[in-house]
Image (spheres, grey):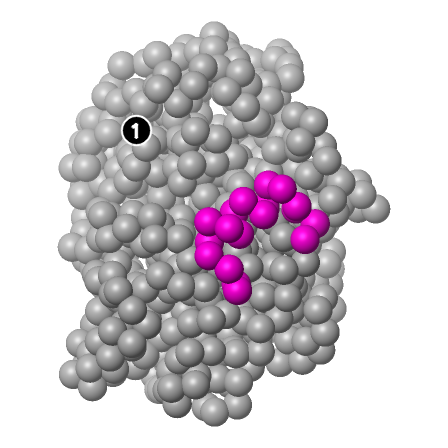
Amino acid sequence: MNTKTIPLPPTGSQLTCKGWHQEAALRCLLNNLHPDVAEDRDNLIVYGGNGQAARNHEALHNIIESLKKLENNETLMIQSGKPVAIFPSHEHGPRVLIANSNLVPHWATWEHFNKLKDEGLMMYGQMTAGSWIYIGSQGILQGTYETFMAAAEKHYGEGKDLTGKLVLTAGIGGMGGAQPLAVKMANGVCLACDVEKWRIEKRLKTKYLDVLCDTFDEAIDLALKSKKENKAISIGVVGNAADFFKYVYDKGIVPDLVTDQTSAHDPLNGYVPHGMPVEVALKLRQTDPKKYTELSYATMGEHVKAMLAFQKIGSHVFDYGNNLREGAKKVGVTNAYDFPGFVPAYIRPLFCKGSGPFRWVALSGDPDDIRVTDNALMELFPENKKLHNWLKKAQDMISFQGLPSRICWLSYGEREKAGLLFNKLVREGKVKAPIVIGRDHLDCGSVTSPNRETEGMKDGTDAVSDWSLLNLMINTMNGASWTSFHHGGGVGIGYSQHAGMVICCDGTEDMDKRLKRVLNSDPGMGVARHADAGYEQAIATAKNSKLKLPSLKINC
């Protein structure tokens, strides 16, 4: 199988597999590799530098064939993108179990991982690439929007947005590409660079970016003019982040917010060193990976120094979860962690409420099914004005990539209600085919990432990954359609472990029971994790629910 023979995801209401859970897995897998979704379809890379959906083309072919033949009482096992076994199981359990990139801690290094990868023995699953529930840049869009809105309220006052504010950032690929649109949706001005022009052009095509400028000065002038006029706009320019940030600083400009979402989690296959044309850098990546990695870390050092300089002159600076600060620390930037990560800075209060990225895909392929679900959610939660605001903006401003999909942040309790609503829509024929529900691994109870989601935990348990494993186990037990457990997503090998969950609303009454279980326990783990760490907001959330937390004597 090669790129030309990778099929598009089936659409419509007719099964190509033996059940809708297998069908959902097949369609979502192929949607990850849809030409409008995947960053590098030839190499099965979905996003994030090297996040793959399958290990190689042979493995992809075998996964597709296995899913088509899989019975409703069998489970397919995926080991780092390769189908390795099909076991008898039961109808209420997951049809697929996935483990990607997991290494025993002593060997959890990029060097050991890359050796195995080069030998064809592993792949990097990132978060939703290898768990088959990526939905294009929209997948992180609302989380990015929530972050920028939370930053606006924290720094400029309750109810404020980014009107008249300038956001400087870098990296606008598959994940970082959400930033320009998120800033615009928050009514701000986004000034962003990317080292590779084709990534910027893809964001223009999908309407995640408004303008590509030819020079640094042109981009800066347009940004300052738009800021003065309170005009929401997203502006891109080709350039290395370290060089562009220093250039902006040297011009005496003080952005209101400064962040970054380059692929710094992977110094070899993600990040690009400065001081040379990008074509030369990419050639060096192949001919001398050791030298390339050294230069990447050195560039990260300069990149972070520029961000620290902005912080000193008054910008609000934060890390957006790509392990950039750790890379800079490796080359002697001892104060790299003087600016915070986005979770402790802005998002943790949402996690304490069991809130996180609830996403869904219309397996019919019909965009009208998403319109139906959007409207139904607004009717279900009439008092949630932020949700209404988001969904209306999403309808107006987001272009679908591959299968039509949507994301919104819902809290503990809300997710369960939404899942039951979607299943009812399927049952009553108000949508044309089943709806599949998933989420990012970046969620309140599914990820352990000390330099990102679990940075600065109140009780010091930043690196305790028991919680991620418990999340995997309870979702598997409770009947998700497929579950996954990955290592390294977001911040790189050695720095995170995290679990994924996907469940298909097929319209049956049996699925009502499964949805109630899974969509209770999944965010419930986030509330439990934060309550156990001593966060008062999480404790209050638990007390006001039916969650039972024995050690805290809550509802027991």
* Residue at 32% over, 79% down: 166
Q: Quadrant of residue 144?
A: bottom left
Q: Quadrant of the C terminus?
A: bottom right
Residue sitting nearer the eye, 187 or 524? 187
Q: Position of residue 268 (x, y in %)?
A: 61, 49
- Number of other residues with Cα within 10 Å of mark 1, as a class: few under 14, some 14 to 19, many 20 or more: many
Task: Tell me residue 68's x, y (percent).
Answer: 44, 11
On screen, residue 294 above or below 156: above
Does residue 11 appear anywhere in the picture? Answer: yes
Residue 474 visible somewhere in the drawing: no
Residue sitting at x 48%, y 84% = 310
Query: Which residue appears at 59% of the width and 46% of the height?
Result: 285
Report the magenta stretch's main SS. Answer: helix
Residue shown at 51% from the left, 74% from the top: 318
Looking at numbered disc 1 in the image, what kind of residue is underneath it? Leu
Queried whether the magenta region covers residue 13, the answer comes back as no
Q: Position of residue 337 (x, y in %)?
A: 64, 75
- Of the 4 image quadrants, the one containing the N terminus is top left
For residue 85, what is the image quadrant?
Answer: top right
| Left or right for 341, reference 134 | right
Decide whether residue 289 is among the magenta residues.
yes
Residue 157, quarter of the rendered image: bottom left
Q: Position of residue 387 (x, y in %)?
A: 28, 60
The region drawn magenta spans: 274-291
Residue under label 1? 363
Please give left or right for residue 396 compared with residue 286 in the image: left
Q: How many marks?
A: 1
Q: Secondary structure at mark 1?
A: loop
> Which is nearer the eye, 270 or 55?
270
Q: Is residue 347 left or right of residue 471?
A: left
